[in-house]
């Protein structure tokens, strides 16, 4: 006996837009370029703890940078795209690339004349929460 197939086709699920996740929090982004902007505004401005939630005690910016260079958190996704735009430097995560950019390429950074904050992109200068 032949089965009678007249069930309506289930609606095809709409192709999900690829979203680009932040590996430090649960945010995702439609545009790939939004991710490093978010990282710089939200995670780079907090240098008091590991953004990957390690228990390590961090009491200075230097300790924070050193920790990120060797952080073993499973949340760190291998990101091969953390390449400096201005030199051949490659970094294991976006935060270290931002730190390098501001430190080594100060002439290619944007600084706020009010809070003296430094940013890698002009639109971050406009978006940041100025502390004054
Ligand atoms: Zn995030
Ligand atoms: Zn860590
Ligand atoms: Zn560089
Ligand atoms: Zn400012």
Image (cartoon, rainbow, N blue to C red):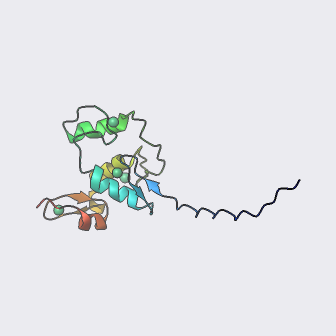
- Horizontally, residue 61 falls left or right of residue 3, namely left
- Horizontally, residue 112 falls left or right of residue 70, namely left
Question: In the rendered view, would you say 26 is above or below 111?
Answer: above
Question: Residue 82, position in %: x, y?
Answer: 43, 50
Which image quarter holds the C terminus?
bottom left
Residue occupying the point 25% across, 39% down: 49
Residue 94 is at least partly visible in this image:
yes
Q: Quadrant of residue 50?
A: top left
Question: Residue 35, position in %: x, y?
Answer: 39, 57
Q: How many marks?
A: 0
Residue nearer the viewer, 40 or 102: 40
Q: Residue furthest front?
A: 1
Q: Residue furthest left?
A: 132
Residue nearer the viewer, 113 or 18: 18
Quarter of the image where ligand 4 sits: bottom left
- Horizontally, residue 51 falls left or right of residue 85, namely left
Residue 105 is at least partly visible in this image:
no
Question: In the rendered view, would you say 61 is above or below 122?
Answer: above
Residue occupying the point 18% across, 63% down: 112
- Horizontally, residue 108 falls left or right of residue 116, namely right
Q: Quadrant of residue 64?
A: top left
Residue nearer the viewer, 3 or 57: 3
Question: In the rendered view, would you say 100 is above or below 130?
Answer: above
Question: Residue 115, position in %: x, y?
Answer: 14, 60
Residue nearer the viewer, 29 or 106: 29
Question: Residue 13, position in %: x, y?
Answer: 60, 62
Question: In the rendered view, would you say 50 is above or below 84?
Answer: above
Residue occupying the point 28% across, 53% down: 42
Q: Quadrant of residue 72?
A: top left
């Amino acid at each position: 006996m032949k089965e009678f197939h007249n069930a309506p086709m289930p609606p095809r699920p709409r192709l999900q837009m690829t979203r680009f996740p932040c590996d430090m929090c649960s945010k995702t982004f439609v545009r790939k370029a939004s991710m490093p902007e978010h990282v710089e505004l939200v995670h780079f401005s907090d240098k008091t703890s590991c953004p990957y939630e390690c228990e390590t005690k961090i009491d200075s910016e230097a300790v924070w940078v050193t920790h990120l260079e060797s952080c073993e958190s499973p949340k760190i996704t291998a990101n091969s795209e953390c390449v400096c735009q201005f030199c051949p430097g490659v970094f294991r995560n976006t935060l270290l690339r931002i730190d390098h950019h501001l430190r080594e390429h100060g002439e290619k950074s944007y600084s706020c004349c009010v809070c003296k904050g430094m940013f890698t992109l002009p639109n971050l200068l406009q978006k940041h929460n100025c502390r004054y």
